[in-house]
Image: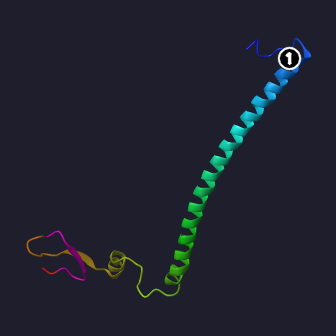
Amino acid sequence: MRGALDFSSWQSLLTTLLGLAVVTLIMVGIRLVVMQTVKRRREGANRQINERLRTLIAAYKTLGGLFTGDLSVDPAHLRSLAAQAGWRQCPVQSGGAASATRWRPRCPT
């Protein structure tokens, strides 16, 4: 590396500075090409994300009317309604399997 920078005469100084300028321009050019490639990839990914968001927004706008207004069904769970009414959970015998249960006012004996 010591021999690459020669300042012994004006011609060698000019040649050294010109060589450094050429190398710098080549490196800047490589950096710009890499930056453009990365930018193009990022823009493609952003376009894909934006398209997905547009689709989701359109779906929410379409389905938005379904979630407003009065509900035709009570959203409370059957278990909480039965507990408020004082009902009990009774086992149901069906075909020899006693794993199922039902809420009833009175369990049959």
Residue 103 percent location from the top left of the image: 25, 78
Q: Residue at x 53, y 84 (%)?
A: 65
For the stretch drawn in magenta, the main secondary structure is loop
How many numbered marks appear?
Answer: 1
Location of mark 1 (residue): 12
Foreground residue among 36 and 8? 8
In magenta segment, residue 104: yes
Image quadrant in which you'd find residue 87: bottom left
Kindly give the residue lying farthest to the front in the view shown: 11
Q: Nearer the viewer, residue 9 or 47?
A: 9
Judge left or right: residue 4 versus residue 40.
right
Seen in the picture, residue 50 relative to 86 is either above or below; the reply is above
Q: Return the residue found at the far right.
A: 10
Displayed quadrant of residue 12: top right
* Above or below, comparing residue 79 to residue 29 in the picture: below
Toward which corner of the image does residue 11 lie, by quadrant? top right
Q: Which residues are magenta?
A: 98-107
The image quadrant where one finds the C terminus is bottom left
Q: How is the image coloured?
A: rainbow
SS under mark 1: helix
Q: Is residue 105 left or right of residue 41?
A: left
Name the amino acid type tagged 1.
Ser
**Badge 1, how many Cα within 10 Å: few under 14, some, many 20+?**
few
Give me the residue at 58% from left, 56% from top. Answer: 45
User: What percent of the width, then of the height, locates residue 56?
Assistant: 53, 70
Q: Position of residue 33 (x, y in %)?
A: 68, 43
Could you say where residue 49 lies in the image, as x and y percent from the top left? 57, 61
In front here: 85 or 65?
65
Depth order, front residue of 47/3: 3
In the rendered image, the quadrant that contains the N terminus is top right
Q: Is residue 22 above or below residue 34?
A: above
